[in-house]
Amino acid sequence: MKMASYSKILGARMRAWASSWMQTSWVMFSLRHGGRIEGRNRCSSSIWKGISTDAHASGEAQTKEQLWKEYFADPSQWWDNRVAKINPRSPDFRHKATRKALWLDGWSTPLWAKLVIEGELQPPVGHRTQSPLDTALPNRPPKNNGRGNSQPTYERESRQSVQVDYPTLHMRSASTLSEAVAVLKNHVHQGITVDSHIYVEVLQRCFRQKNLTSAKQVHDCIKRSGMEQNVYVANNMMRVYIGCGQLQEARQVFDRLVKKSVFSWTIMIGGYAQHDHAKDGFELFNQMRYEGTQPNEVTYLSILKGCANPVALKWGREVHGHIRHGGFQSNVRVGTALLKMYAKCGSITEARDVFDNLTNRDIIAWTVMIGAYAECGRGHEAYELFLQMQQQGYKPDAFIFTSLLNQRSSAAGALEWVKDVHAHAVKAGLELDVRVANGLINMYAKCGCVDNARRVFDRMINRDIVSWNVIIGAYAESGCGAEAYQLFLRMQREGFIPDTFTYLGILNPCASVGALEWVKEVHAKARNVGLDTSVHVGTALVGMYAASGTIDDARQVFDKMVRRDVTSWNVMIGAYAEHGCGTQAHQLFLKMQQEGFTPDKFTYLGILKPCADMGALDWVRKVHAQALQAGLQSDLSVGNALIHIYAKSGSIDDARLIFDGLMERDVITWNAMIGGYAGIGRGHEAYELFLQMQREGFVPNATTYLSILNASASPGALEWVKGAHDHACQGGLESNLRVGNALIHMYARSGSIDSARLVFHRMLERDVITWNVMIGALAQHGYGHEALQAYKQMKTEGFKPNELTFVAVLSACSHAGLVDEGRRQFLAMTQDYGIRPSVVHYTCMVDVLGRSGCLEEAKLFIQNMPIEPDGAIWGALLGACRTHGNVELAELAAEERFRLEPKDSSAYILLSNIYASAGRWDQVSLLRTLMQERDIRKEPGRSWIEVAGKIHHFVVGDTSHPETKEIYAEQKKLFERMKAQGYSPDTRLVLHDIDEEDKELALCSHSEKLAITYGLMRTPPGEAIRIFKNLRVCSDCHTATKFISKVTGREIVARDANRFHHFKDGVCSCGDYW
């Protein structure tokens, strides 16, 4: 057809149909949408008039694309909303400057232009295609041909191709989608040509209703009618599949399109973004560019949305590069999308760079940037930007305030700027806005200012459920359980129904104050509304009942839960673990897996504790193997737990293997390994690790020092304690109460009572533990009177003694021989402080009486005890009998000790010593025979000393030391000097009936004498000698050591099984009372 004919027909038809078509089409739209057409009618009419007039004035229009571009001369002046459009009432385009709305029925061409061009210029051969306008009004008169007469334009009886009845289909689809699909299928089955707009209309219905079944039926009709290559239809088909979550089907529709529009690419990329398939979306974006289709604004908005997570950040950065290259960086919407992407990925610096480079910012960009700072806890910077925004003339709205107050965590000094933001909200008249008020309550609570939060809440005129939840949560986080519970009751009186978040908030304070009754009341209310069996509320109830100590109630709630998640199982397993129910925890762990739940790292952390508590090393190994299979071998928290548990179970080598195999460590890792070594007495390894962790750049914390300081005492421990003390001072932890207490304890255990005193007097803060440790240390070192003075000072300073205090005080009385004071303190414990004596207190009291020689009183004391005496009590009486030579009472005490602790050799040895001292060698022989019959072996006496960083061990009669000859030679000279000063060996202690000379030689070979002699040989003159012995020092060694200190002028500190002895100038700190 010639171009002149095209222009004439187009101009005539457009002018002739203008009034009639616009009125008719909007009447039909009004019928479908309840008459709400006023604004849209005016807008579309004005557009129609503009184009119609322009076309008439020019007299010709070259093509439909030229007609399209006449109005959209500059497409950049319009927002294109078609891809994201869901509601048909929303405009397809909106002018950026005037905000004028524009609706189209097509993706690339206005419906009225499409009808004119296709209907008049491209009819089938021999027939004209019926326009939807012809069927819009069945009673419409025939069209005027321009010559004054009207006549039919086609023969209905001989029609070969007709379009579906468009209004009828709309009326059917307005009632039910299934009827519309049935009509469509019927038309396709009968071979009636269906216009693409009809398919789109039905597909949009499927999209709005998310009806995948109907969508597939329509898709089948599209295939049968050969409309798959219609890009308009295909794009809508893709939207439906994406909306229904069928990405694979959407991609198949996309791949079958031979000619794709930019919208086709954008829809598919947006689908991947919507369903978190960032990699697929990025690959498609690259393919789009490779095939020559240039992304538009909406494409970039879609791909950036898909890259808004940390995993996809690298792809988002590449897209950013393309945006810069394509000149879209100054585009406000694209820039804002970039801003959102970087913010959600946590890359605040890059987000700020994008923000700073935006030449034209709108309020949305400011809101996103402020929200990004607030979201990552950088509240001060968010506040600074908030002020800058106002300086540049932007007025904050409710969204700005909400973003600013939506912080994940509060920072130091945040309260001041929160108050300032509050003032701005008041000035803007937004203080009472529900969202702003909720944000203020939340931030005041995070800053610890619950009173301000409550004032905001009380001033609110309108509250929602969030308001109540936030204020209840504020009181909960502040530990104000009673207030939270009262608000929980009040909200219900005011007609608000608690939701899941309400119950999660109120259950926390109920447990924190130990209010089991509150928990039960809240449980009852949750049960009434059916929330007690929900996953979140049910799990919270399990945790709260467990925290309140009612593990059976927790299990009942757990068993009644309709649905559980992994967290529910973890909480219940953890509850059993905390209450020492290891078997139940392990059974639940197995049941969890039987029901198809896969344990996560928190499950393993929960189940490992009861395995260790039960000493079930086999269970620990099995759980460890499962954790490895689950890929948790590199998880730091699981590794730390395994180190702690293997060490606690006595398998320190397994703990070390895990420690060495961890690619990443933290301070907790080092503390667990150091504590493991310290707990089993391997202080040297503990101290070496302590030094190594600092070499590797880790800073010890209070727990580290507690671990290293609680290492078992040994000769070398004093140097470790001093080293740890120096590091603690450098780290500013010397004033830490727990570290100070541990330093006192370890200095005392290592034999340096003077250093313990110094730490005690330097402490700025003390507690009952501090006083107990110091009193006990003084008592163990033989300073009983000083210990009692410290006890009096403790009471003067207002500290109330506890059970451990009286153990230390009675021990001090015992070591100092203060019988009367011991009796007074034992009575004061019950009469003045209401403390019921334990078996330890009774043992101390027997020791007080026995050491002072009140053996009969001690015997009566035991017989009148309200509790059954244990082996330690009879052992204390037996030791006193040895000191005072009471054979008869010794036999009674020994018999009871044999009965209670039949395998303990110490009672046999004590009784043998008593018999030997009394010269009853036949009884000694019988007792030795009895030990052989009962397979009871005497523990050999061992002593050790550290010299030049090396530990030297000695046993009685030792000849294994490399310097044995030198030691015995030096000892012979030493004993001659001692005898010259009056030393006489106590040969009564030798348990063999041999001559006196051999008895003296036997006494000379005691392990502590050998250790002291070696110390004198290999330590500098004037340096104190410190030895440790595994058994109680004998009376001859005690006397000999006093003489050694006198003749050598050296201080000797000896730690035996019971206490410390400080020998100096021939005197012992115990006053010969041990």
Image (cartoon, rainbow, N blue to C red):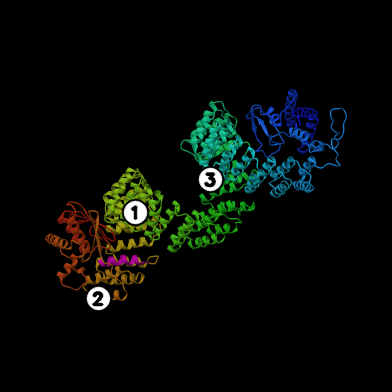
Give the percent coordinates (x, y) of residue 1074.
Answer: 26, 61
| Disc 3 to disc 1, C-alpha distance | 37 Å
**Residue 36 appears anywhere in the view:** no
Residue 710 is labelled as 1
Give the percent coordinates (x, y) of residue 804.
Answer: 37, 55
Badge 1 amino acid: Asn
Is 874 within the magenta? yes
To which residue does mark 2 refer?
925
Badge 3 amino acid: Ala
Is 504 within the magenta? no
Give the percent coordinates (x, y) of residue 173.
Answer: 76, 44
Q: Is residue 43 above or below residue 763?
A: above
Nearer the observer: mark 2 or 1; the answer is 1
Q: Earlier in the sequence, mark 2 or mark 1?
A: 1
Badge 2 amino acid: Ser
**Closer-to-camera residue (160/1037):** 160
Question: Residue shown at 68%/46% (left/top)?
Answer: 210
Q: Quadrant of residue 591?
A: bottom right
Marks counted in the figure total 3
Instruction: Locate residue 984 relative to residue 102 in the image: left or right.
Output: left
Q: Earlier in the sequence, mark 2 or mark 3?
A: 3
| Disc 2 to disc 3, C-alpha distance | 73 Å
Other residues around mark 1 within 10 Å, as few (<14) / some (14–19) / many (≥20)? many
Read off the magenta span.
869-882
Local SS, label 2 = helix
To which residue does mark 3 refer?
476
Nearer the observer: mark 3 or 1; the answer is 1
Q: Do the numbered discs 3 and 1 sit on residues whose CB atoms are within 8 Å?
A: no
